[in-house]
Amino acid sequence: MARKRKPRSIKESRATPLEDCNFGDPRTFEPDFKGPVSNRSCTDVLCCIIFLFFIVGYILLGLVAWVHGDPRRVAYPTDSQGHFCGQKGTPNENKSILFYFNLLKCTSPSVMINLQCPTTQICVSKCPERFVTYVEMQISTKHNRSHWAYYRQFCKPSFVMPKKSLTEILLDEDCPTAIFPSKPFLQRCFPAFSTDNGTLTVGNKTTFEDGSGKTRNVMELRAAANGVNRLLKGRSIGTKVFEDYSTSWFWILTGLIIAMVLSWMFLILLRYIAGLLFWIFMLGVLGIIGYGIWHCYREYQKLQASSTSELTIYDIGIQTDLSIYFELKQTWFTFMIILCIVEAIITIMLIFLRNRIRLAIALLKEGSKAIGYIPSTLIYPVLTFILISICISYWAVTAVFLATSGTPIYKVITPGGQCVHENKTCDPEIFNTTEIYKACPGAMCNFAFYGGKSLYHQYITIFQLYNLFAFLWLINFVLALGQCTLAGAFAAYYWATKKPDDIPPFPLFTAFGRAIRYHTGSLAFGSLILALIQMFRITLEYMDHRLKNAHNKVSKFLQCCLKCCFWCLEKVVKFLNRNAYIMIAIYGKNFCKSARDAFNLLMRNVVRVAVMDKVTEFVLMLGKILVAGSIGILAFLLFTQRIPMILKGPTSLNYYWVPMLTVIFGSFLIAHGFFSVYAMCVDTIFICFLEDLERNDGSTARPFHMSQSLLKILNKQNLQTEKR
C-alpha cells in the first residue's frame, strides 16, 4: 500500500530551485531575537592589532619622510647643478624659470631611461624673445656690445666673454648654440608656438638655424616639446576659467544648496512616488521598443516593394560601408525579431515577477520612512567626506616628501646615449677632469634626482608602495565604518516593535560607537581584502602602461583577462563586504561568520535579491539624473541669460559651460552622497526583512516586525492583529 505523501505548504510550493538548496539552515538562529545585539564582544582582535600597528607605522613613515623630504624640490625647477630656480636667499632668487640649452636633444631615447633631458639646464629671469645663433651674436657683438649682454643671460654665469669657437661651445656647453622665441610654462621655457593659416610657426618662422650649421624645421621643435602648444593654450583658457569661477561662485554655491534640498525632498517623497516612477519607466521602455518594432516593420515593408528586395547579406558579402546593410530587408527583419524577443522577455518578467517588484517598491518606501525617522543619517556622508579628505591629503603629502628625500644625485648623460659610462653617478665639480669626460666627448654630468646611500634612501620605493597600500586600506576602512554605522542605525529602526516610539535614542551615534569599540578588527579585515585586490589591479595597470608598446599578443590577451577577472572580483567582494557589515551591525559576529551568514541568506532568496538590486539601482539612478538635470537646466537658463526678467545671473562669463558643468557635476555628487545613505538603508532593511521572514511566524511569541504594507504583499498577518 503506497504511503501518502504530505502536501507541501504554500511557502514550500513557491520556493525556487535555488531556494531549495541548503545555503545554511535558518532554524539555527536564536528564536528570541528582537533586534541588534547589545551584549557584544570585540571581533577579529588579531586583525585589529595588526591594523593599529599598521597605522602607527604609517604615522612614523610620514614623520621620517617629513624630516628627510623637501617639497621645495617639487615647487621649484632644478638646474643641471641641482640648484633651485627662484628660491629666496639664493643667487637664483630672481631667476625662477628653467632654460634648456638645446631642447632638440630632448627627443633622445635616454630621456625615457633617465627621465632627464640630456642638455644643460640653467635658471633664467625671462625666456628668449628672438631667433639668434651664437655665431650671429659673436659677429654682432663686434659692433654693438648689447647683443652679448642680451645673449649672456642664457649662458652659464661663469662664461663672461664670447671668445670660444663654435666647436668649443658645442663641446663645453657654456652657452646655447642658438636661442628662439619662447614662453614660460610651468616655470620652464618652451617654444612660443603659434599657427599662421594652419601652419605651425615659432616667431613667424617655419625653419631656423640651430647654431651648429643645420637648418631645422619647427616640427622638430614640436617633437621635442610634444603637446606644448596645446598646454600653452590651456594656460590662457585656465585663466579665463578662473575668472568665470570668481564671477559665478555665489550662483554655483546656490545651485549646490538647491541640489541638497532637492535630494532630501526626493528621498522623503519616495514613500509616495517610488512605484509610480518605476512603472512609468518600464512602460516607457516597452513603448520605445514597440516603436522600434513598428519602425523596423515599416522599413521592411518599404524594401519589400523595391527592385532589390531579393538581395541578401550573403549576396553583398562584407562591406566597409555599413549603410549598405540598411538597404536590405533582411537587416530590418532581423532587427524586428530581436526587438520582439526583448519586448516579450521584459513583458514576461514583469508579469511573473510582479509580486517581487511590488515587494521591492514597498521596501524602497520603507527606506524613505526610516530616513524620515532618523534624519541625522543624511549628515553622516559629511563625516565620511572629511575622513577621506584627510586620508587623501596625508597620502599626497607623504608621497611628495618621500619623492623629495635625499641629496642631489648626478648622472652621466650623453646626447646620443652611446657612451659606455651612460647613467653612471658623477660629481659635477670635477667631471671635466675625469676619464669619463675624455672617453665620451659631449658627455655631461647633470642633476638626475634626489636620493642617497643610507638604508632609508635604499628603500624609498618600498616606502612609496607602503604609502599607497596604507592609503587604499584606510579609504576602504572609512567606507566600511560608514556602512556598518548606517546599517546599525537602520537595523534599530526595523526591529523596533512600535515605530517610532521604540526606536532607541541617538541610533546613529550608538551604532558608530558600537562599530568603533567592538568591530574595528572586522571592518579592517574586510577592507584589507579589498585593498589587496585594488593593489593588484593597480599593479596590472602599471604593467600594462609599461608594456603598452609590446607586440606580444598572447601577453596582452592574458593581461586583459586578468584585468577583467580582478575587476569582477572587486565588484563581488564589495557586494559581499557590504552585506557582511550589515550582519556585523545586527549580530556582532566576526567578519568571516557574518560574510558566510549574509551569503547564505542572500542565496536562499536569490530572486528577491536580483529584483531588489535592479529596482533600487534604477530608482536611485533616476533620482540622481532628476536632481542633476533639474539643476543643470536652471543653470543653463541662468548663465546664458535666458531668463533675465525672472532672475539675472552673471553677465561677463567667458565660458558659460564652466559654471554650468560645475553645478551639474557637484549636484550629481551631492545626490550620490544622499542616495548612498538611502541605498544602505534599503539594503539593511532588506536583510532585516529576510531575517524577519525566517525567524518569525506571526505568532504572539514570534511576531513579524515588518510594516503592514509588507505583510499585505506577502499575505501574512500577526496573530494579535488577526484577533483585533
Image (spheres, helix red, strand yellow):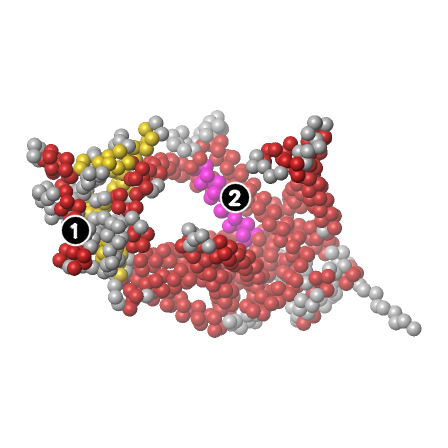
Separation of disc 2 and disc 1 at Cα?
54 Å
Q: Identify the residue shown where x is 8% and y is 33%.
A: 144
Q: Is residue 661 magenta?
A: yes
- Does 39 appear above or below 381? below
Looking at the rendered image, the quarter that the N terminus falls into is bottom right
Q: Earlier in the sequence, mark 2 or mark 1?
A: 1
Residue 640: x and y, percent? 46, 30
Secondary structure at badge 2 equals: helix
Left or right placement of residue 557 versus residue 702 in this view: left
Callouts 2 and 1 close, C-beta under 8 Å: no
Residue 236: x and y, percent? 33, 36
Q: Identify the residue shown where x is 26% and y is 61%.
A: 451
Q: Which amino acid is tagged 2?
A: Val
Which sits in the foreground, 705 or 135?
135
Secondary structure at badge 1 equals: loop
- Does 457 appear above or below 413? below
Looking at the rendered image, the quarter that the C terminus falls into is bottom right
Q: Which amino acid is tagged 1?
A: Thr
Which sits in the foreground, 388 or 554?
554
- Does 246 appear above or below 58? above
Q: Identify the residue shown where x is 70% and y is 46%.
A: 346
What is the crowding at mark 1: few (fewer than 14 residues within 10 Å), some, or many (at least 20)? few
Q: Quadrant of residue 211?
A: top left
Numbered range of the magenta stretch: 659-678
Q: Residue furthest right?
A: 1
Which sits in the foreground, 7 or 216?
216
Q: Identify the residue shown where x is 37% and y is 37%.
A: 241
For residue 489, say whether it is visible: no
Write down the residue under mark 1.
Answer: 90
Q: Quadrant of residue 263?
A: top right
Write down the residue under mark 2.
Answer: 261
